[in-house]
Structure formats: structure tokens, C-alpha cells
Amino acid sequence: MNIFIIGAGFTRAVIPTSPLNSDLIDTLASRKPNDSAATLLRDQYKTDDIEIALTRLDCDIAQRAAGSGEKILLRQRVEAELGDYFSSFSASKVAQPIWLLQFVDDAFSSGDVVISLNYDCVLEGLLDYRYKWSPRDGYGSYFNHPLVSKNDFASSPVTVLKIHGSASFTNTPIQ
């Protein structure tokens, strides 16, 4: 078993235009100039670093601070914006360079564990594209999704642990 730590440098190597932490809030905000949750997040926590802002937001939610209901909605809106943004990175489109496919094929084996510092699912998409990852239990346990049955997927050979959370390729609009 191998253990990998994957950070923003991986996504940047695969997609050179992808934003780093300090640019992600601005990138999300620019997609919805008049109604961006990312803008609210930045203004509320006075930082351009999305990890710092989301950590502070999560702490406020966990402590049931004043306005927790609004903070939960803000968290959901930010997650939806992240999901919408990263949904444009399809694995088949990203997996064009031969070196990348060779890297995934050669580096990752059944039983390996990846600790990912990324919100995006670029790595999971590439691993899935090469049959080395599955949403069934690829995050360590079955990911319960109301539209996906556990039986729809094979067991995942590689486990990906997302310590900062994740923005999947599918997102549910906030009502």
C-alpha cells in the first residue's frame, strides 16, 4: 500500500488555469458578480483564502453561533458554486496528455490511499476514468446519495480522503 498526499499543485499541473486557494474565492465570485456566495464568504471572514474562510464558517456553524441557520445556507451555497465551477473539468477532457494517463496507471494500485488537500475532484475523476476509483466506497465508506444506489458501482481500488471537503462533479441546486 502506498500513501499519497495531493495538493493544489496536482490540479494546477493538470489544468494550468485552475485557481489556487488565494484565487478561488475571486474566481467563484466572478462567475456570479451580483449574487455570489463566495463574495459573501470573503466579506464576512475578511480573507481571500477559501480554506481559512470555510474553516471559520464551519467553526461558527459547529459552535451554533448567532445566525447559524444563515451560515449553513451560506455553506451550502458556496458548495454549490464550487460544484458548478469544478463540474467543467470532465475527466475525459482533462486526461488528454499521455503523461497523465501513464502517471495514473503506473502510480496508483489497489489498496493505495490518497490524502487530498483539494476541493476539486480532478484526481478522483482521473482515477475513475482509469477504473482505479469508485464513488461507492472511494471516500473510505459508502457515500450516500439519494439518486445513486450502492449497487451501481464496483468497490473502489483506491481510497481518497478529502480533509478539506469536496466539490463533486454533480451538484444539487439550493431551493
Image (cartoon, rainbow, N blue to C red):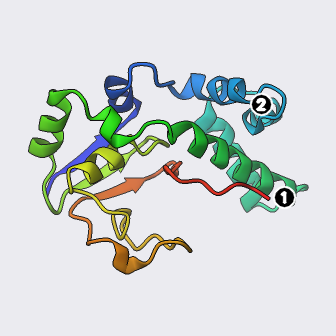
Which comes sooner in the sequence, label 2 or label 1? Answer: 2
Amino acid beneath label 2? Thr
Mark 2 to mark 1 CA distance (whole Å): 18 Å
Q: Quadrant of the C terminus?
A: bottom right
| Residue under numbered circle 1 | 68
Which of the two marks, 2 or 1, is nearer to us in this view?
2
The answer to whether mark 2 and mark 1 are in CB contact below 8 A is: no
Screen quadrant of the N terminus: bottom left
Percent x, y of residue 174:
75, 56
Mark 1 Cα shell of 10 Å, populated few (<14), some (14-19), many (≥20): some
Question: Where is residue 61, by image quadrant?
Answer: bottom right
**Quadrant of residue 50 within the rendered picture:** top right
* The residue positioned farthest toward the top in the image shown: 17
Comparing 17 with 147, the one in front is 147
Count neighbours of disc 2 (C-alpha within 10 A) and say few if under 14, some if 14 to 19, many if 20 or more.
Answer: many
In this view, the residue farthest toward the right is 66
Residue hosting label 2 = 39
In the figure, is residue 119 to the left or right of 37? left
| Image quadrant assignment for residue 21 | top right
On the image, the x and y values in percent for residue 28 come to 65, 30
| Residue toward you, 136 or 98 | 98
At x 21%, y 56%, the residue is 132
* Number of numbered discs visible in the structure rendering: 2
- Residue located 62% across and 25% down the image: 27
